[in-house]
Amino acid sequence: MQNGKNMTNKLILLYLFLFFVSCKKNEETKNYKDLNSTEYFSIATNLKNLKKIEKLKINDSLFKIKGQFSIYEIKGQINKNNKRIGWWEATDNNTKELVAKLEYKLIDKKEFVNQYILFENKKIDTLSSKFYSLKKKVNSVSYRFYIPNQLKKIRSEGKLNYRYSFQGKEYRHLESKAVKNKNIFECEISLPKNIDDNDFIIQGGFWEMFQLENGGIGANDIYVLDTIQGNTKK
């Protein structure tokens, strides 16, 4: 997660400012400069801050949520314990344009924002977002991790620590060192030769460590869980 005390992302503050206009008088959220990105998003998607909430049951353990926050429509899902899970979306009621998406994960029954995507002119703002993409090749899987641009970084490195399951066996304690290109980190994972009829499950976490000009240390991380289908499967 981003260290809120050591770094301030001005672009995130700009894009999300309107999310918090209606919360200015709230003593818990009046000092936005002390909040990290996870806390920013949590304000807008917190059920306690939503108005006109609609709740639709999908099954016994999953519900769809829709509500209003300031001039935005918020959509997402919660489990039976009212924990936010999966991807949530914020749409501008006036322009009907998607403003932001964020992914909630549950680890040890605690929810946190794993990825967030900001949009500018209907396109992903890759310099201000934190998310990943993957591409399956013939003999490998290529990961791209997009990390918010931080001009005050002087050193930075990233790696993907992971394990994978294949043919009923689990292989642990593996690592792929990332190649950095500006704010994008790329990792490559080789696939077994006999993957044609089998699924390949990757689970782990990308971790970036960086140093700032003032000597401070910060980190970003993204949890991954992906199933790569065999080549003969549709």
Image (cartoon, rainbow, N blue to C red):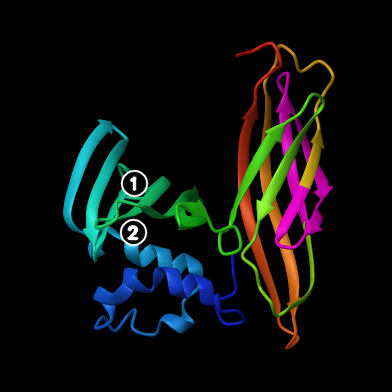
Residue under the point 80% across and 52% down? 178
In the image, is 128 to the left or to the right of 228? left
In the image, is 79 to the left or to the right of 190? left
Is 125 contained in the magenta span? no
Give x and y (percent) for residue 98. 38, 52
Give x and y (percent) for residue 82. 30, 49
Q: What's under tag 2, amino acid-wise?
A: Thr
Give x and y (percent) for residue 58. 28, 31
The answer to whether mark 2 and mark 1 are in CB contact below 8 A is yes
User: What span is colored magenta in the figure?
Assistant: 159-186
Q: What's under tag 1, amino acid-wise?
A: Gly
SS state under label 2: helix
Residue indicated by mark 2: 45
Residue indicated by mark 1: 76
In the image, is 202 to the left or to the right of 86? right
Rendered position, 118 above or below 172: below
Quarter residue 189 falls in = top right
